[in-house]
Amino acid sequence: GNSVTQMEGPVTLSEEAFLTINCTYTATGYPSLFWYVQYPGEGLQLLLKATKADDKGSNKGFEATYRKETTSFHLEKGSVQVSDSAVYFCALSDALMDSNYQLIWGAGTKLIIKP
Amino acid sequence: ETGVTQSPTHLIKTRGQQVTLRCSSQSGHNTVSWYQQALGQGPQFIFQYYREEENGRGNFPPRFSGLQFPNYSSELNVNALELDDSALYLCASSSVGGYTFGSGTRLTVV
């Protein structure tokens, strides 16, 4: 079945460092790919998404490119801030009926940014 | 504001009891999904409702059941609670570009 694999955390970086969080997937068909972020004590917020191969999603300085040839959707940011500390989840869409879908999730990667 | 409200925020129940969790989403959002997130893990799909009918179900036993109402609210019911049911339960409703999640209900079974 479809699945998502993320790099294990925690990932600890200094402020202004470059960030990469790896995400690879296994899927039949052509899923959409997502990155969600979860701040402590909060729910999940959509960070960015891509719906087809070679699409680049971007938001708040984060970006990720849908790479079908390597089945990857790595999250990157050029200069992280302390406020980026959170848990990041990679997910893919899995079709249900009536054009709806469920999300299949990676285990999450905790990001810690030190001042 | 996310547009999806869940209640209660926290809940403690005893093994064997029953629990009802509630979710209220924005008007016009016809699809609601429920996910279980165990500590330190990614969410797991429980089920989805579309226009008040179950539209898909994950690998959860029948003691997990749900309802969706015409006013865009929904419920997750869990019978015969087990210790492993302790988790954060998340409700998500459809929105432009993806799903919008509530802040969740933290259920602890003792």
Image (spheres, coloured by chain):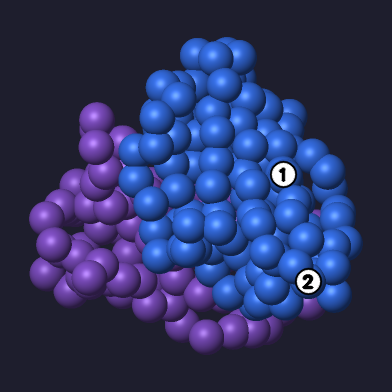
Chain colours: A purple, B blue
Image spot of residue A8 (x, y percent): 52, 86
Residue labelled with disc 1: B21
Mark 2 lies on a secondary structure that is loop
- The residue shown at (13%, 62%) is A28
Residue B10 is tagged as none
Q: Which chain does the numbered disc 1 sit on?
A: B
Position of residue B56 measured from the top left corner of the image (x, y, whole percent): 34, 46
Q: Identify the disc placed on residue B15.
A: 2
**Depth order, front residue of B62/A29:** B62
Judging from the image, mark 2 belongs to the subunit labelled B
Label 1 secondary element: strand
Give the left or right position of residue A95, taking residue B68 as reference: left
Q: Is residue A50 above or below residue A6?
A: above
Residue B45 versus residue B86 in the image, above or below: above
* Whole-number angstrom distance, CA of label 1 to CA of label 2: 16 Å
Where the N terminus of chain A falls, by quadrant?
bottom left
Identified at 63% across, 25% down, the residue is B73
